[in-house]
Amino acid sequence: MAENPDKFDMVCDAHFAPFASSSFDLVLLSNVLEHVENRRQVVEESLRILRDDGILVVTVPSVLWKVIEITLYYLDLAHIVIYEDSSAGEESHVQDSELKVDAEETTRRFLWSYVLPGTHGLYRGNMDEILSYRVGAWLEILSSAGDIRVTTAKLPLYPSNSLRIGRRHRLLQSLGFSSSNCFIVTKIHN
């Protein structure tokens, strides 16, 4: 089978795409923006390489996704503490009382580091992440990057452990809940 000369793979920094201006009809940023240092610069660069009337499709996590992630984090942590840790200490015995104190302090510090889950992407903390996942926050970044027209699209609510496909899942999805925000950005003629 002959290789397609128009198809190639390239790894590059999204902040500085190594392509000529107006090179593409479509650019897809699928769950990219939450992982880059300068979101606006990545959007500007994506628009630069788009032809006039080109389409930029951006998908990013929603606030609901983060809330579900935090909720599941605590359920998973409780499962580990209750079911897995209950049998872990039975075989281990510390003879030296000083070592036992150090072990308890290490355990306490370790557990305290798990009070809040980590962030998904480049954020100062969970609240910063939640606030930046709002539709308005993403629209602000997109709109500040150039002359564009933005349309939003509904994506499905992805099932998770607590939202298995069923009544709860269908109800939340029918109410408009989504795991991701999707923006279809059209570059306007310069």
Image (cartoon, helix red, strand yellow):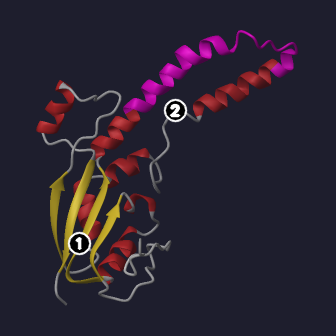
**SS under mark 1:** helix
Q: Which quarter of the figure has residue 31?
A: bottom left
Task: Pick whichever, 64 or 52, lies toward us.
Answer: 52
**Residue 151 x, y percent position in the rendering:** 14, 64
Q: State the residue position of label 1.
A: 143
Quadrant where the N terminus is found in the figure: bottom left
Over which residues does the magenta segment extend? 71-99
| Residue 92 is inside the magenta segment | yes
Q: State the residue position of label 2.
A: 115
Of all residues, the one furthest to the right in this rendering is: 96
| Residue 141 is inside the magenta segment | no
Chief SS of the magenta region: helix
Q: Is residue 74 above or below residue 57?
A: above
Relative to residue 9, is residue 141 drawn left or right? Answer: left
User: First in sequence: mark 2 or mark 1?
Assistant: 2
Quadrant where the C terminus is found in the figure: bottom left
**Residue 127 x, y percent position in the rendering:** 39, 46
Relative to residue 88, is residue 165 drawn left or right? Answer: left
User: At x 23% / y 57%, what residue is drawn?
Assistant: 182
Relative to residue 183, is residue 60 drawn left or right? Answer: right
Q: Residues within 10 Å of mark 1 (few under 14, many from 20)?
A: some
Q: Residues within 10 Å of mark 2 (few under 14, many from 20)?
A: few
